[in-house]
Image: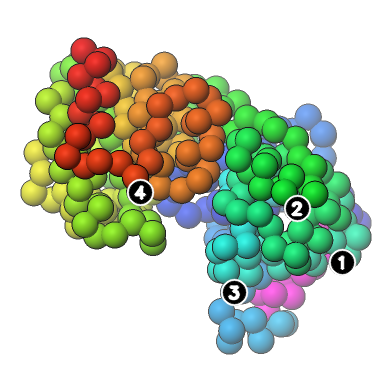
Amino acid sequence: MKNYILLVGNYGGTNLGDEMLKQASLQMLASEKTEVKTMQPCGGDFEVFASGFRSMLNFRGQNWQAFLAIKNSSRVVFGGGGLINSDNWRSLVIWGQILAVALILGKQVDLVAQSFSSPPSTGLRWLLSKCNSVSVRDKLSQEYLSQVGLNSKLVSDLALDLDMDSIKNIFEDNKLLEGQLLLSNDYGICNAREYSKLSDSRCKSIVSMLEQIEVPLVFVPFDKSDIDFYNKYMSNSQIPMAAASMQLFQNAKFAIGMRLHFCLTAMKFGLDVLPLAYASKVLGLFGDLGLQVVDLYTLHVQKNPLREWVNKKK
């Protein structure tokens, strides 16, 4: 019996932002009074289709279970994030498979609060045109869809709908670090990550600019890979690292960061935020919100716009 909504997302990993999107999506769907089951890379009710070539041949295993999960659902909802993009082949394979199968099986498909980093290719455009609805979380994504004749609704990022209790639970249930850091009340929080389009020298420049800020900073990872960034580029830094917590955000004076949901969380706590745009989704979303955004590909390192921004806040 087709009696559940299938919620699809990049949940279940080590990314706090993705867990926020999952929780917000579940809260959004709760009003429909229908059971919700999740399809995610790990830890959900169903796993996504295998993306490796050998794994894809195992049709009777993981792929068969994913097929049945879609077939037995009443509708399919992609809940938040930048899941499907033509310029990311792996992303297109993982999430595009689910979208294509759902549409072939005649399911109602809704893409909620998504981001697009480029105009969809012909194949993806056709798939999106068959969806029941598509909503996006920034005007740049909406413009990309409009360029290929697709309509979309502009909405807020789902994480902005979370209340403080939900955020607290996500912090406590997904601790990336153990222990606590004793801090004064005069500090800022920061976040950084590696990204395929950012060179090693640019990553080092970002760290250098953070270290030149005169107000004490605390590095807050929002994904396990952020800890890898810290260990690679900041292990000898005077900037300590601490797990995300309510107290850490509540007592901070400002936030500077690359992770989109690190910045959105800081906004939820009423902090002044300086997003560092490594991808169009960061540039588009925070530009729409009227924030100053630093484009990491065009900034002048010598001028250090991060330090200038902090100095203006004093």
241 with respect to 48 (left or right): left
The numbered mark at residue 104 is 1
- In this view, 312 is above or below 19: above
Q: Position of residue 232 (x, y in %)?
A: 19, 57
Task: Report which residue position mark 4 lands on.
Answer: 297
Label 3 SS: loop
114 with respect to 18 (left or right): right
> How far apart are labels 1 and 2 at the CA level?
22 Å
Of the two numbered discs 1 and 3 on the same chain, state the one appearing first in sequence: 3
Q: Position of residue 10 (x, y in %)?
A: 57, 54
User: Quarter holding the N terminus?
Assistant: bottom right
Of the two numbered discs 4 and 3 on the same chain, state the one appearing first in sequence: 3
| Amino acid type shown at disc 3 | Ser
- Between marks 4 and 3 in the image, the one whose residue lies nearer the viewer: 4
User: Which stretch did the figure color magenta?
Assistant: 61-74
Task: Report which residue position mark 2 lands on.
Answer: 148
Q: 280 or 110, which is in the foreground?
A: 280
Label 4 SS: loop
The numbered mark at residue 51 is 3
